[in-house]
Image (cartoon, helix red, strand yellow):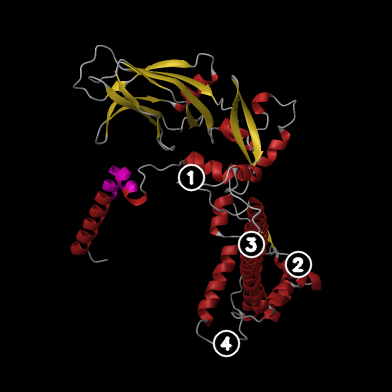
Amino acid sequence: MVFNPVKMLNESVVIIIVSIALAGVWRYRDRVLAALTGDDKIHGGCLDCVWYTICQCCGTCTGDWTRCFTECQICPARYRKRNLVRLLGQWLGLTTHTVEMKNITVGDLPFNGRGDFYLSIGNTTNPEMFSSVAEEKLPKVVHFPEVLTLKLRFSPLEGRICIKVRELNVFGSEDVCQVYLGAQQVLHWAWSNENMKRFEMKALDQALENETPPWILVEFGEASEIREIDNIRDYDSVITATRQGETWTAERTDLMEYKYHNPLLDPSGHAIDEPPEEDLRQIERMQRCARWSFHFCNMWTFVLVIAWVVFRVYVWSCYRRFTWLTEARLHNVNATTPIAFPLSFHKMESIGSQCAKEVEGTRLKAVACRPSSEQVNVICDEPKNGGTFFETTRQPWPMAFAGTEWVETLTGKQTGITCFRGLCEVRSFIVKYEVEFIGVCALVVLGNILLRCACNSCIRSKRSDLQRQRQDEAKAFKTSRKDVEARGTFRFW
Protein backbone atom coordinates (compact mmCIF):
# COMPACT_ATOMS: atom_id res chain seq x y z
CA MET A 1 0.00 0.00 0.00
CA VAL A 2 1.34 3.44 -1.01
CA PHE A 3 1.66 5.93 1.83
CA ASN A 4 -0.52 8.96 1.15
CA PRO A 5 0.30 11.81 3.58
CA VAL A 6 -2.51 14.06 2.31
CA LYS A 7 -5.15 11.40 2.93
CA MET A 8 -3.71 10.63 6.36
CA LEU A 9 -3.72 14.35 7.24
CA ASN A 10 -7.36 14.71 6.16
CA GLU A 11 -8.42 11.71 8.25
CA SER A 12 -6.51 13.04 11.27
CA VAL A 13 -8.18 16.45 10.98
CA VAL A 14 -11.63 14.83 10.74
CA ILE A 15 -10.93 12.66 13.79
CA ILE A 16 -9.73 15.69 15.80
CA ILE A 17 -12.78 17.78 14.83
CA VAL A 18 -15.21 14.95 15.71
CA SER A 19 -13.43 14.36 19.03
CA ILE A 20 -13.62 18.07 19.93
CA ALA A 21 -17.32 18.15 18.97
CA LEU A 22 -18.09 15.08 21.10
CA ALA A 23 -16.14 16.51 24.03
CA GLY A 24 -18.10 19.77 23.73
CA VAL A 25 -21.42 17.91 23.62
CA TRP A 26 -20.46 15.94 26.74
CA ARG A 27 -19.18 19.03 28.55
CA TYR A 28 -22.37 20.98 27.87
CA ARG A 29 -24.71 18.00 27.76
CA ASP A 30 -27.28 19.71 29.99
CA ARG A 31 -27.60 22.59 27.54
CA VAL A 32 -27.76 20.21 24.57
CA LEU A 33 -30.52 18.22 26.28
CA ALA A 34 -32.40 21.41 27.15
CA ALA A 35 -32.16 22.56 23.52
CA LEU A 36 -33.37 19.21 22.16
CA THR A 37 -36.00 18.22 24.74
CA GLY A 38 -36.67 21.29 26.91
CA ASP A 39 -35.26 19.48 29.97
CA ASP A 40 -31.62 19.36 31.06
CA LYS A 41 -31.86 15.93 32.72
CA ILE A 42 -32.27 12.35 31.58
CA HIS A 43 -35.04 10.95 33.77
CA GLY A 44 -33.90 7.35 33.71
CA GLY A 45 -30.94 5.05 34.13
CA CYS A 46 -29.75 1.47 34.19
CA LEU A 47 -32.03 0.61 37.13
CA ASP A 48 -35.07 1.83 35.20
CA CYS A 49 -34.02 -0.26 32.19
CA VAL A 50 -33.66 -3.43 34.29
CA TRP A 51 -36.98 -2.81 36.06
CA TYR A 52 -38.87 -2.13 32.82
CA THR A 53 -37.37 -4.93 30.71
CA ILE A 54 -37.02 -7.79 33.22
CA CYS A 55 -39.46 -7.16 36.07
CA GLN A 56 -42.24 -5.66 33.95
CA CYS A 57 -41.57 -7.65 30.76
CA CYS A 58 -41.22 -4.45 28.71
CA GLY A 59 -44.39 -2.98 30.20
CA THR A 60 -46.65 -5.95 29.45
CA CYS A 61 -46.94 -7.11 33.10
CA THR A 62 -47.28 -4.66 35.99
CA GLY A 63 -47.63 -7.41 38.61
CA ASP A 64 -50.96 -6.10 39.96
CA TRP A 65 -52.38 -9.61 39.70
CA THR A 66 -50.19 -10.54 42.72
CA ARG A 67 -52.28 -8.31 45.02
CA CYS A 68 -54.77 -11.15 45.41
CA PHE A 69 -52.14 -12.98 47.51
CA THR A 70 -51.70 -10.05 49.92
CA GLU A 71 -55.34 -9.02 50.46
CA CYS A 72 -56.05 -11.60 53.16
CA GLN A 73 -56.19 -10.44 56.78
CA ILE A 74 -53.39 -12.77 57.92
CA CYS A 75 -50.94 -10.83 55.74
CA PRO A 76 -48.85 -8.34 57.76
CA ALA A 77 -50.24 -4.80 57.60
CA ARG A 78 -47.00 -3.53 56.07
CA TYR A 79 -47.48 -5.74 52.99
CA ARG A 80 -51.28 -5.88 52.81
CA LYS A 81 -52.74 -5.13 49.36
CA ARG A 82 -49.24 -4.62 48.01
CA ASN A 83 -47.88 -5.58 44.60
CA LEU A 84 -45.44 -8.47 45.17
CA VAL A 85 -43.51 -7.74 41.98
CA ARG A 86 -43.02 -4.16 43.09
CA LEU A 87 -42.00 -5.31 46.56
CA LEU A 88 -39.36 -7.55 44.97
CA GLY A 89 -38.16 -4.62 42.87
CA GLN A 90 -37.91 -2.43 45.98
CA TRP A 91 -35.95 -5.12 47.82
CA LEU A 92 -33.53 -5.42 44.87
CA GLY A 93 -33.20 -1.65 44.59
CA LEU A 94 -34.79 -1.51 41.13
CA THR A 95 -37.86 0.54 41.98
CA THR A 96 -38.64 3.31 44.42
CA HIS A 97 -39.76 3.63 48.03
CA THR A 98 -41.88 6.56 49.19
CA VAL A 99 -40.30 8.91 51.73
CA GLU A 100 -42.00 11.96 53.24
CA MET A 101 -40.17 15.11 54.33
CA LYS A 102 -42.02 17.18 56.91
CA ASN A 103 -41.38 19.72 59.67
CA ILE A 104 -38.94 21.39 57.30
CA THR A 105 -37.11 24.31 58.89
CA VAL A 106 -33.99 26.18 57.79
CA GLY A 107 -31.92 28.60 59.82
CA ASP A 108 -28.84 30.81 59.97
CA LEU A 109 -29.09 31.47 56.25
CA PRO A 110 -26.21 33.47 54.72
CA PHE A 111 -28.45 36.37 53.69
CA ASN A 112 -28.77 39.99 54.78
CA GLY A 113 -32.20 41.37 55.65
CA ARG A 114 -35.61 39.86 54.98
CA GLY A 115 -36.22 37.68 51.96
CA ASP A 116 -38.69 35.44 50.13
CA PHE A 117 -37.24 31.96 50.58
CA TYR A 118 -38.25 28.64 49.07
CA LEU A 119 -36.78 25.14 48.72
CA SER A 120 -35.94 23.08 45.64
CA ILE A 121 -35.42 19.34 46.01
CA GLY A 122 -34.36 16.88 43.33
CA ASN A 123 -32.01 14.11 42.33
CA THR A 124 -30.59 12.80 39.06
CA THR A 125 -33.69 10.98 37.76
CA ASN A 126 -36.72 12.65 39.37
CA PRO A 127 -37.96 16.11 38.38
CA GLU A 128 -37.19 18.97 40.71
CA MET A 129 -39.77 19.81 43.41
CA PHE A 130 -40.40 23.21 44.95
CA SER A 131 -41.92 24.32 48.21
CA SER A 132 -44.13 27.35 48.70
CA VAL A 133 -42.51 30.75 49.16
CA ALA A 134 -42.00 31.92 52.74
CA GLU A 135 -42.50 35.64 52.23
CA GLU A 136 -40.56 38.40 54.03
CA LYS A 137 -38.86 36.09 56.52
CA LEU A 138 -35.75 36.77 58.53
CA PRO A 139 -32.92 34.36 57.67
CA LYS A 140 -32.45 33.26 61.29
CA VAL A 141 -35.32 30.72 61.17
CA VAL A 142 -37.64 29.97 58.24
CA HIS A 143 -40.44 27.36 58.41
CA PHE A 144 -42.07 25.55 55.50
CA PRO A 145 -45.52 23.94 55.95
CA GLU A 146 -45.27 21.37 53.12
CA VAL A 147 -45.03 17.63 53.37
CA LEU A 148 -42.86 16.77 50.37
CA THR A 149 -42.83 13.24 48.96
CA LEU A 150 -39.67 11.69 47.50
CA LYS A 151 -39.34 8.54 45.40
CA LEU A 152 -36.00 6.87 46.19
CA ARG A 153 -34.37 3.53 45.41
CA PHE A 154 -32.42 1.64 48.05
CA SER A 155 -29.40 1.20 45.79
CA PRO A 156 -25.85 2.58 45.68
CA LEU A 157 -26.53 3.50 42.04
CA GLU A 158 -29.29 5.93 43.04
CA GLY A 159 -28.27 9.57 42.73
CA ARG A 160 -27.96 11.84 45.75
CA ILE A 161 -30.69 14.26 46.81
CA CYS A 162 -29.89 17.94 46.46
CA ILE A 163 -31.75 20.36 48.77
CA LYS A 164 -31.30 24.04 47.94
CA VAL A 165 -32.56 27.15 49.67
CA ARG A 166 -33.34 29.88 47.18
CA GLU A 167 -34.33 33.52 47.56
CA LEU A 168 -36.91 34.81 45.12
CA ASN A 169 -36.05 38.05 43.35
CA VAL A 170 -38.01 40.25 40.96
CA PHE A 171 -36.01 38.74 38.11
CA GLY A 172 -35.13 35.10 38.71
CA SER A 173 -33.88 33.70 42.01
CA GLU A 174 -30.63 33.36 43.93
CA ASP A 175 -29.20 30.15 45.37
CA VAL A 176 -28.42 30.72 49.04
CA CYS A 177 -27.16 27.35 50.32
CA GLN A 178 -27.43 23.64 49.59
CA VAL A 179 -26.80 20.16 50.96
CA TYR A 180 -26.48 16.72 49.32
CA LEU A 181 -27.90 13.59 51.01
CA GLY A 182 -27.44 9.95 50.01
CA ALA A 183 -30.61 8.10 49.02
CA GLN A 184 -29.79 4.96 51.03
CA GLN A 185 -29.03 7.00 54.15
CA VAL A 186 -32.31 8.91 53.81
CA LEU A 187 -34.21 5.62 53.60
CA HIS A 188 -32.41 4.36 56.72
CA TRP A 189 -33.47 7.49 58.60
CA ALA A 190 -37.05 7.17 57.34
CA TRP A 191 -37.28 3.57 58.59
CA SER A 192 -35.66 4.26 61.99
CA ASN A 193 -37.17 5.72 65.15
CA GLU A 194 -34.78 8.71 65.19
CA ASN A 195 -35.90 10.22 61.94
CA MET A 196 -35.63 13.95 62.70
CA LYS A 197 -32.23 15.28 61.58
CA ARG A 198 -30.53 18.68 61.33
CA PHE A 199 -27.92 19.01 58.59
CA GLU A 200 -25.26 21.57 57.88
CA MET A 201 -25.72 23.34 54.56
CA LYS A 202 -23.00 24.81 52.35
CA ALA A 203 -23.21 28.56 51.73
CA LEU A 204 -22.94 29.33 48.02
CA ASP A 205 -21.97 33.00 48.39
CA GLN A 206 -18.48 32.90 49.91
CA ALA A 207 -18.35 36.70 50.14
CA LEU A 208 -20.73 36.68 53.11
CA GLU A 209 -19.27 36.02 56.56
CA ASN A 210 -21.40 33.85 58.86
CA GLU A 211 -20.89 33.30 62.55
CA THR A 212 -22.48 29.86 62.28
CA PRO A 213 -23.10 27.59 59.28
CA PRO A 214 -26.60 27.41 57.78
CA TRP A 215 -28.67 24.35 58.60
CA ILE A 216 -31.87 22.53 57.69
CA LEU A 217 -34.12 20.48 59.97
CA VAL A 218 -36.06 17.65 58.33
CA GLU A 219 -38.18 14.81 59.65
CA PHE A 220 -38.08 11.77 57.37
CA GLY A 221 -40.83 9.19 57.45
CA GLU A 222 -42.62 6.52 55.46
CA ALA A 223 -45.73 7.34 53.44
CA SER A 224 -48.55 8.35 55.80
CA GLU A 225 -51.03 9.57 53.17
CA ILE A 226 -54.42 8.41 54.36
CA ARG A 227 -55.60 7.42 50.88
CA GLU A 228 -52.75 4.86 50.53
CA ILE A 229 -52.23 5.75 46.89
CA ASP A 230 -49.39 3.24 46.46
CA ASN A 231 -51.78 0.38 47.27
CA ILE A 232 -54.64 1.38 44.96
CA ARG A 233 -55.65 -1.37 42.56
CA ASP A 234 -59.15 -0.25 41.54
CA TYR A 235 -58.55 2.28 38.76
CA ASP A 236 -62.29 2.90 38.20
CA SER A 237 -62.81 4.77 41.43
CA VAL A 238 -61.77 8.05 43.04
CA ILE A 239 -60.43 8.08 46.59
CA THR A 240 -60.74 11.34 48.53
CA ALA A 241 -59.77 12.23 52.08
CA THR A 242 -62.54 13.86 54.13
CA ARG A 243 -62.33 15.34 57.60
CA GLN A 244 -64.85 14.34 60.24
CA GLY A 245 -64.19 16.26 63.43
CA GLU A 246 -60.58 15.69 64.39
CA THR A 247 -60.08 12.60 62.25
CA TRP A 248 -59.55 12.09 58.54
CA THR A 249 -61.15 9.24 56.64
CA ALA A 250 -60.68 7.97 53.10
CA GLU A 251 -63.81 7.71 50.96
CA ARG A 252 -63.91 5.63 47.79
CA THR A 253 -66.39 6.64 45.06
CA ASP A 254 -67.06 4.97 41.75
CA LEU A 255 -65.69 7.07 38.89
CA MET A 256 -69.04 7.16 37.10
CA GLU A 257 -70.84 8.40 40.22
CA TYR A 258 -68.05 10.85 41.01
CA LYS A 259 -68.29 12.44 37.55
CA TYR A 260 -72.06 12.66 37.92
CA HIS A 261 -71.88 14.56 41.23
CA ASN A 262 -68.84 16.65 40.16
CA PRO A 263 -69.47 17.89 36.61
CA LEU A 264 -66.65 18.97 34.33
CA LEU A 265 -66.06 22.74 34.35
CA ASP A 266 -64.25 25.10 32.03
CA PRO A 267 -61.75 27.65 33.42
CA SER A 268 -64.65 30.08 34.02
CA GLY A 269 -66.49 27.56 36.18
CA HIS A 270 -69.27 26.72 33.72
CA ALA A 271 -70.31 23.10 33.22
CA ILE A 272 -69.40 21.57 29.87
CA ASP A 273 -70.36 18.34 28.15
CA GLU A 274 -68.14 15.27 28.26
CA PRO A 275 -68.65 11.69 27.05
CA PRO A 276 -70.53 9.52 29.59
CA GLU A 277 -68.28 7.21 31.57
CA GLU A 278 -70.24 4.11 30.56
CA ASP A 279 -69.54 4.92 26.89
CA LEU A 280 -65.87 5.43 27.63
CA ARG A 281 -65.71 2.11 29.47
CA GLN A 282 -67.41 0.31 26.58
CA ILE A 283 -64.96 1.79 24.07
CA GLU A 284 -62.04 1.02 26.38
CA ARG A 285 -63.12 -2.64 26.69
CA MET A 286 -63.31 -2.92 22.90
CA GLN A 287 -59.88 -1.33 22.53
CA ARG A 288 -58.40 -3.65 25.13
CA CYS A 289 -59.93 -6.70 23.46
CA ALA A 290 -58.67 -5.57 20.04
CA ARG A 291 -55.23 -4.80 21.42
CA TRP A 292 -54.80 -8.18 23.09
CA SER A 293 -56.19 -10.01 20.05
CA PHE A 294 -53.74 -8.20 17.82
CA HIS A 295 -50.84 -8.91 20.19
CA PHE A 296 -51.85 -12.58 20.36
CA CYS A 297 -51.95 -12.90 16.58
CA ASN A 298 -48.68 -11.02 16.22
CA MET A 299 -46.98 -13.20 18.80
CA TRP A 300 -48.00 -16.46 17.13
CA THR A 301 -47.17 -15.08 13.68
CA PHE A 302 -43.73 -14.12 14.91
CA VAL A 303 -43.22 -17.51 16.58
CA LEU A 304 -44.34 -19.45 13.51
CA VAL A 305 -42.26 -17.37 11.07
CA ILE A 306 -39.15 -17.62 13.25
CA ALA A 307 -39.70 -21.36 13.73
CA TRP A 308 -40.07 -21.80 9.98
CA VAL A 309 -36.91 -19.79 9.26
CA VAL A 310 -34.90 -21.71 11.88
CA PHE A 311 -36.16 -25.06 10.57
CA ARG A 312 -35.42 -24.01 6.99
CA VAL A 313 -31.86 -23.01 7.92
CA TYR A 314 -31.44 -26.28 9.81
CA VAL A 315 -32.57 -28.32 6.79
CA TRP A 316 -30.30 -26.29 4.49
CA SER A 317 -27.33 -26.82 6.82
CA CYS A 318 -27.89 -30.58 6.92
CA TYR A 319 -28.49 -30.91 3.18
CA ARG A 320 -25.33 -28.97 2.42
CA ARG A 321 -23.30 -31.50 4.41
CA PHE A 322 -24.93 -34.41 2.58
CA THR A 323 -24.08 -32.65 -0.69
CA TRP A 324 -20.41 -32.32 0.30
CA LEU A 325 -20.26 -36.02 1.21
CA THR A 326 -21.84 -36.89 -2.15
CA GLU A 327 -19.25 -34.75 -3.99
CA ALA A 328 -16.42 -36.51 -2.13
CA ARG A 329 -17.93 -39.93 -2.84
CA LEU A 330 -18.39 -39.21 -6.56
CA HIS A 331 -14.85 -37.82 -6.75
CA ASN A 332 -13.44 -41.14 -5.52
CA VAL A 333 -15.15 -43.10 -8.32
CA ASN A 334 -12.58 -42.22 -11.02
CA ALA A 335 -9.95 -40.36 -8.98
CA THR A 336 -6.31 -41.48 -8.97
CA THR A 337 -5.90 -39.94 -5.51
CA PRO A 338 -9.11 -40.70 -3.65
CA ILE A 339 -10.26 -38.66 -0.69
CA ALA A 340 -9.75 -40.45 2.61
CA PHE A 341 -12.76 -40.95 4.84
CA PRO A 342 -13.93 -40.07 7.47
CA LEU A 343 -14.02 -36.35 6.72
CA SER A 344 -14.02 -33.53 9.23
CA PHE A 345 -16.33 -30.57 8.77
CA HIS A 346 -13.53 -28.30 7.60
CA LYS A 347 -12.38 -30.93 5.07
CA MET A 348 -15.95 -31.26 3.74
CA GLU A 349 -16.25 -27.49 3.56
CA SER A 350 -12.99 -27.20 1.60
CA ILE A 351 -14.21 -29.87 -0.86
CA GLY A 352 -17.45 -27.96 -1.34
CA SER A 353 -15.59 -24.68 -1.88
CA GLN A 354 -13.21 -26.27 -4.39
CA CYS A 355 -16.11 -27.83 -6.30
CA ALA A 356 -17.97 -24.51 -6.37
CA LYS A 357 -14.91 -22.87 -7.96
CA GLU A 358 -14.55 -25.64 -10.56
CA VAL A 359 -18.15 -25.45 -11.83
CA GLU A 360 -18.62 -21.69 -11.40
CA GLY A 361 -19.87 -20.14 -14.63
CA THR A 362 -20.55 -23.50 -16.29
CA ARG A 363 -23.76 -25.28 -17.06
CA LEU A 364 -22.49 -28.75 -16.37
CA LYS A 365 -24.95 -30.98 -14.57
CA ALA A 366 -23.78 -34.60 -14.46
CA VAL A 367 -20.41 -34.02 -12.78
CA ALA A 368 -19.02 -34.97 -9.38
CA CYS A 369 -18.97 -31.36 -8.23
CA ARG A 370 -22.60 -30.81 -9.11
CA PRO A 371 -24.52 -33.89 -7.92
CA SER A 372 -28.20 -34.23 -8.63
CA SER A 373 -30.86 -34.50 -5.95
CA GLU A 374 -31.16 -38.25 -6.62
CA GLN A 375 -27.43 -38.72 -6.02
CA VAL A 376 -27.58 -36.79 -2.75
CA ASN A 377 -30.62 -38.82 -1.66
CA VAL A 378 -28.60 -42.02 -2.07
CA ILE A 379 -26.42 -41.07 0.90
CA CYS A 380 -29.16 -39.25 2.75
CA ASP A 381 -31.51 -42.28 2.67
CA GLU A 382 -28.86 -44.99 3.14
CA PRO A 383 -29.84 -45.93 6.71
CA LYS A 384 -33.41 -46.49 5.54
CA ASN A 385 -32.35 -48.44 2.43
CA GLY A 386 -29.75 -50.59 4.16
CA GLY A 387 -26.69 -48.81 2.72
CA THR A 388 -23.23 -49.26 4.21
CA PHE A 389 -21.49 -46.00 3.30
CA PHE A 390 -21.42 -44.63 6.85
CA GLU A 391 -20.47 -48.06 8.26
CA THR A 392 -17.61 -48.79 5.86
CA THR A 393 -16.15 -45.27 5.87
CA ARG A 394 -16.84 -44.66 9.58
CA GLN A 395 -18.10 -41.25 8.57
CA PRO A 396 -20.05 -39.63 11.43
CA TRP A 397 -23.65 -38.82 10.70
CA PRO A 398 -23.88 -35.13 9.66
CA MET A 399 -24.85 -32.51 12.21
CA ALA A 400 -26.35 -29.11 11.38
CA PHE A 401 -24.33 -26.03 12.36
CA ALA A 402 -21.34 -28.23 13.27
CA GLY A 403 -18.09 -26.41 12.60
CA THR A 404 -19.74 -22.99 12.68
CA GLU A 405 -17.33 -20.47 14.11
CA TRP A 406 -19.69 -18.73 16.54
CA VAL A 407 -21.01 -22.07 17.84
CA GLU A 408 -17.50 -23.34 18.52
CA THR A 409 -16.58 -20.04 20.18
CA LEU A 410 -19.70 -20.17 22.36
CA THR A 411 -19.41 -23.81 23.43
CA GLY A 412 -15.64 -24.26 23.25
CA LYS A 413 -15.98 -27.44 21.16
CA GLN A 414 -17.37 -28.64 17.87
CA THR A 415 -21.06 -29.26 18.40
CA GLY A 416 -24.21 -29.23 16.34
CA ILE A 417 -27.72 -30.58 15.97
CA THR A 418 -28.03 -34.11 14.60
CA CYS A 419 -29.78 -34.28 11.23
CA PHE A 420 -32.92 -36.41 11.44
CA ARG A 421 -33.55 -39.42 9.20
CA GLY A 422 -35.54 -38.69 6.09
CA LEU A 423 -34.38 -35.09 5.94
CA CYS A 424 -33.89 -35.16 2.18
CA GLU A 425 -37.54 -36.07 1.61
CA VAL A 426 -38.60 -33.17 3.78
CA ARG A 427 -36.20 -30.90 1.91
CA SER A 428 -37.65 -31.98 -1.43
CA PHE A 429 -41.16 -31.23 -0.17
CA ILE A 430 -40.06 -27.78 1.08
CA VAL A 431 -38.36 -26.94 -2.21
CA LYS A 432 -41.42 -28.07 -4.15
CA TYR A 433 -43.77 -25.82 -2.15
CA GLU A 434 -41.30 -23.02 -1.26
CA VAL A 435 -43.32 -20.34 -3.00
CA GLU A 436 -46.52 -21.49 -1.32
CA PHE A 437 -44.90 -21.39 2.14
CA ILE A 438 -43.61 -17.86 1.57
CA GLY A 439 -47.05 -16.85 0.29
CA VAL A 440 -48.72 -18.25 3.42
CA CYS A 441 -46.32 -16.28 5.65
CA ALA A 442 -47.03 -13.11 3.70
CA LEU A 443 -50.78 -13.74 3.91
CA VAL A 444 -50.60 -14.26 7.67
CA VAL A 445 -48.74 -10.97 8.13
CA LEU A 446 -51.21 -9.23 5.81
CA GLY A 447 -54.08 -10.83 7.72
CA ASN A 448 -52.79 -9.33 10.98
CA ILE A 449 -52.65 -5.89 9.39
CA LEU A 450 -56.18 -6.27 8.02
CA LEU A 451 -57.36 -7.50 11.43
CA ARG A 452 -56.01 -4.38 13.07
CA CYS A 453 -57.62 -2.15 10.46
CA ALA A 454 -60.93 -3.99 10.89
CA CYS A 455 -60.79 -3.65 14.69
CA ASN A 456 -59.99 0.06 14.48
CA SER A 457 -62.81 0.56 12.00
CA CYS A 458 -65.24 -1.30 14.28
CA ILE A 459 -64.19 0.82 17.28
CA ARG A 460 -64.59 4.06 15.32
CA SER A 461 -67.99 2.94 14.14
CA LYS A 462 -69.05 2.09 17.70
CA ARG A 463 -67.81 5.47 18.95
CA SER A 464 -69.75 7.25 16.22
CA ASP A 465 -72.90 5.26 17.06
CA LEU A 466 -72.61 6.15 20.73
CA GLN A 467 -72.07 9.83 19.93
CA ARG A 468 -75.06 9.83 17.61
CA GLN A 469 -77.17 8.11 20.26
CA ARG A 470 -76.21 10.71 22.88
CA GLN A 471 -76.96 13.52 20.45
CA ASP A 472 -80.38 12.05 19.72
CA GLU A 473 -81.06 11.76 23.46
CA ALA A 474 -80.02 15.39 23.97
CA LYS A 475 -82.27 16.54 21.12
CA ALA A 476 -85.18 14.54 22.51
CA PHE A 477 -84.61 16.06 25.95
CA LYS A 478 -84.51 19.61 24.55
CA THR A 479 -87.66 18.96 22.51
CA SER A 480 -89.53 17.62 25.53
CA ARG A 481 -88.42 20.60 27.63
CA LYS A 482 -89.65 23.03 24.97
CA ASP A 483 -93.01 21.25 24.97
CA VAL A 484 -93.22 21.59 28.75
CA GLU A 485 -92.31 25.29 28.56
CA ALA A 486 -94.93 25.82 25.84
CA ARG A 487 -97.59 24.36 28.14
CA GLY A 488 -96.43 26.70 30.92
CA THR A 489 -95.63 23.97 33.42
CA PHE A 490 -91.86 24.48 33.46
CA ARG A 491 -90.44 27.45 35.30
CA PHE A 492 -86.98 28.59 36.20
CA TRP A 493 -86.46 29.51 39.80
- Element at badge 3? helix
First along the sequence among labels 4 and 1: 1
* C-alpha distance separating marks 2 and 4: 30 Å
* C-alpha distance separating marks 3 and 1: 27 Å
Eye-nearest disc, 4 or 3: 3
**Residue 420 image position (x, y, % from top left):** 73, 65
Crowd around label 2: few <14 · some 14–19 · many ≥20 (10 Å): few
Q: Which residue is mark 2?
A: 421
First along the sequence among labels 4 and 3: 4
Residue beneath the point at 61% across and 49% down: 60
Q: Which residue is mark 4?
A: 364
Image quarter in which the C terminus is found: top right
Q: Which residue is mark 1?
A: 269
Q: Which residue is mark 3?
A: 479
Q: Nearer the viewer, residue 389 or 427?
A: 427
Q: Nearer the viewer, residue 45 or 1?
A: 45
Residue type pointed to by label 3: Thr
The stretch of residues the image draws in magenta is: 22-34
Eye-nearest disc, 2 or 4: 2
Dominant secondary-structure state across the stretch colored magenta: helix
Eye-nearest disc, 2 or 3: 3
- Element at badge 1? loop
| For residue 322, side relative to residue 213 (left or right) | right
* C-alpha distance separating marks 4 and 1: 89 Å
